[in-house]
Structure formats: C-alpha cells, structure tokens
Image (cartoon, rainbow, N blue to C red):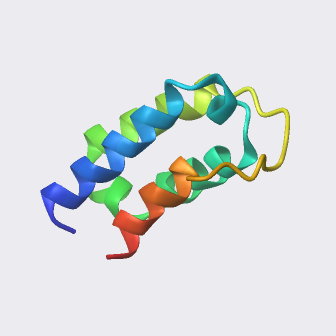
Amino acid sequence: MSAKSVKAIESKLQEGMSLEKCRKCMCMKGTLDYLLSSAISKDNPEFHRKVNHWLKEMKTEYDCLGCEPCIPWQAMEHYER
C-alpha cells in the first residue's frame, strides 16, 4: 500500500477520533480492530502504534448511528483501493 493511502487512512481515522460520537461507535472500533491486524499495521510500526492508541481511547456505547458519511467507512474505502 502506498504511503499516500496510509496517510489518507490515518487522516480519516484522526478525523473520526476527534468526534465523541465516533469514539463511542462500534463502526470505529471494528475498523480499528481490523486495521490493527492488517498488513498495513504489520508493515508500518508507526501506523500500528496510532491505531493501538486510538483503540485505547474507545468508549464503545452503541453499534451504529447511521451517520452519513460514516468516517470509519471512508477510511476503509482508502484501504480497499
């Protein structure tokens, strides 16, 4: 995965983690869990550290609010490209 794509994912995740609603949402937690075990995380120690840090900030209270747009989903769009 290109450095540009990793940066785009980080940017979206940071955007989401700055919002209380995302820090409480299972959509964000699921995305972070997936990315923590992904090849990006294994190949990029700094990305792994950030994702691990964000996971520790999670205070999951609900499954999905149906936000439009869903920031974790946008992050995953960059992952899948």
Q: Which residue lies furthest to the left in this view?
A: 3
Residue 47's place in the image compared with 69, above or below, is above
Task: Say which quarter of the image contains residue 6.
Answer: bottom left
Q: Residue furthest front?
A: 68
Name the spot of residue 4 as percent of width and height, x first. Answer: 15, 56
Residue 19's place in the image compared with 10, above or below, is above
Residue at image x 38%, y 35%?
Answer: 49
Name the spot of residue 42 as percent of width and height, x first. Answer: 35, 57
Q: Which of the two residues, 34 or 64, is positioned nearer the viewer here?
A: 64
Name the spot of residue 45 as percent of width and height, x first. Answer: 28, 43
Residue at image x 74%, y 53%?
Answer: 66
Classify the position of the C terminus by image quarter: bottom left
Q: Residue furthest right?
A: 62
Task: Say which quarter of the image contains residue 21.
Answer: top right
Q: Residue furthest bottom?
A: 81
Classify the position of the N terminus by image quarter: bottom left
Q: Which of the two residues, 4 or 51, is positioned nearer the viewer here?
A: 4
Residue at image x 57%, y 54%?
Answer: 31
Residue 57's place in the image compared with 24, above or below, is above
